[in-house]
Image (cartoon, rainbow, N blue to C red):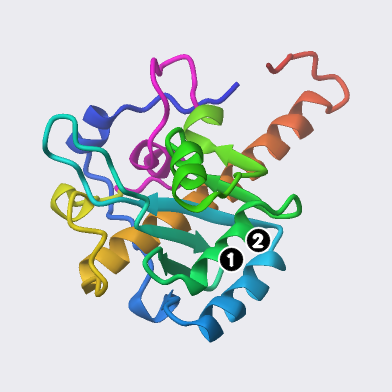
Amino acid sequence: MSGVVLNRRQIADSELPFYRGVSMAEITTVDCPEAAWSARSILLAAPVVGFDTESKPTFRKGEVSTGPHLVQLAVESQVYLFPVWCEANHAALKDVLESGDVIKVGFGLGNDRSALKSRLGIELNRVVDLGEVLRGPGHRGTVGAKVAVAHYFGEKLIKSKRVGTSNWANRHLDERQMLYAANDARVALKIYHAWLRDMSRNRAVSTHPGNTQEYS
């Protein structure tokens, strides 16, 4: 069972140092066939990638989302932003997201499966929703990235609501949008590795000779 028990209010009231996210030098926008093929090769060679999507928000009652408009995939050294308007990206995304060899990790992925299936005909495979697996007894809902970053790294992840609800369907995203989107995917990858280390330590303690404590 996860030990993540912090909540957003505790984090907002804390004086934790700010989480340092990705830099622009670590972001690649995939917007042509050559870039799509290169990113596909790198991502398919990775055992696990950080994953998220962004969609243009809907504001009118009954309005149906046309998203996702952007798909973000992260490896240790780079984050790839795949704008969905670029048709060259569709085949690359399908290969990576349907791959049984690559684990995709992210937060709050409940709607991504149906949206990707509807928009791009992609069937997500080998996905880990960290919001679910990190949920401890102190959480009624899922765990968000802010809570996970505070728990594992002792830092405060800042996410701009204004940027998060901006127009992700634009063909040219500004720097704030690119950093916001890239951080969502990269932080998921970092949290996943921290969670694995935590799980490994717990197993080591529980199996140590003379230790009779049980872990669920």
Residue ID at (51%, 28%): 132
Q: Quadrant of the C terminus?
A: top right
Q: Quadrant of residue 29?
A: bottom left
**Residue furthest out toward the bottom:** 34
Residue 51: % across, % down = 50, 53
Residue 67: % across, % down = 34, 49
| Residue type, label 2 | Asp
Give the structural element (helix, strand or loop) at label 2.
helix
Q: Nearer the viewer, residue 12 or 14?
A: 12
The residue identified by callout 2 is: 95
| Residue type, label 1 | Ala
Answer few, some or many: residues within 10 Å of disc 2's Cα (few below 14, many 20 plus, some between 14 and 19): some
Residue ID at (45%, 41%): 112
Residue ID at (49%, 24%): 135
Q: Using the image, tell me which numbered label, if any, was put on residue 91.
A: 1
Give the structural element (helix, strand or loop) at label 1.
helix
Residue 212: % across, % down = 80, 13
- In the picture, measured across the screen, residue 32 lies left or right of residue 15, that is right
- Foreground mark, 1 or 2, reads 1
Segment tinted magenta in the rendering: 135-156
Residues at marks 1 and 2, CA–CA distance in whole angstroms: 6 Å
Residue 195: % across, % down = 59, 41
